[in-house]
Image: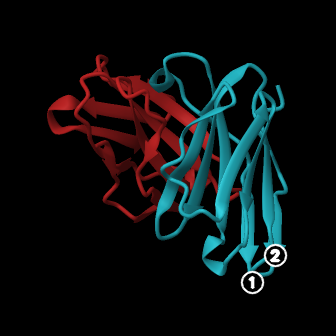
Chain colours: A red, B cyan
Amino acid sequence: AQKVTQAQTEISVVEKEDVTLDCVYETRDTTYYLFWYKQPPSGELVFLIRRNSFDEQNEISGRYSWNFQKSTSSFNFTITASQVVDSAVYFCALSELSGNTPLVFGKGTRLSVIA
Amino acid sequence: DAGVIQSPRHEVTEMGQEVTLRCKPISGHDYLFWYRQTMMRGLELLIYFNNNVPIDDSGMPEDRFSAKMPNASFSTLKIQPSEPRDSAVYFCASSPLQALGRTEAFFGQGTRLTVV
């Protein structure tokens, strides 16, 4: 069965600090997809990134970067030089291809960036 | 495109009353999902549809919950009778017809349900 674990329930950092949000997943599939979503205080879920299991290249988008390591079943998310607007709940999610499964989400990590 | 549209945004109802949540998916999307978000359990999948047909409803917590998708542009989630423990944010999401796992789901703004 697929499972996503985000061990960090809450993180608090001071503005301009770097912060890494951890995500560990479990799956029996060889082909799967990993996602990160952001949920700001307004409540909507905003898609950030999708990564398939065959692409282990790290990705950078502005201040955001993602580190995918199949060896440790992890897909961690780093925010560089954090800003107050980054304060949100961040969800990691997994979808298996063979079972054609919808997204299974982790419990989320609440990030607070303090000015 | 306006995105996934849910109504109402907020609903307060008394225990025992029927509640109906509504969703309009993105046009052209063939998959529709209902998720529930609570502090204790996070985001849980309740049910999902493909081409208006329910595929997996194993996440529906009880018989009090039912969902329908009468056409490609509309779905409802009904709770009858409602109970205080049903209080949560209910999200509807849709995704296009590709191999399901290859695309992200696009979420609506959610309906915050409070049952008193």
Placement of the N terminus of chain B among the 4 image quadrants? top right
* Left or right: residue A79 compared with residue B104: left
Q: Nearer the viewer, residue B61 or A114?
A: B61
Q: Earlier in the sequence, mark 1 or mark 2?
A: 2
Q: Are marks 1 and 2 in contact (CB under 8 Å)?
A: yes
Q: Residue at x 29, y 31 (%)?
A: A68
Q: Residue at x 74, y 19 (%)?
A: B28
What amino acid type is highlighted by mark number 1?
Val
Q: In the rendered structure, the residue with mark 2 lies on which chain?
A: B
**Residue A44 visible in the current orientation:** no
Whether A106 is drawn above or below B85: the answer is above
Q: Residue at x 71, y 56 (%)?
A: A42
* Left or right: residue A25 compared with residue B40: left
Q: Residues within 10 Å of mark 1 (few under 14, many from 20)?
A: some
- Say which residue label 2 marks: B13
* Left or right: residue A82 compared with residue A72: right
Q: Residues within 10 Å of mark 2 (few under 14, many from 20)?
A: some
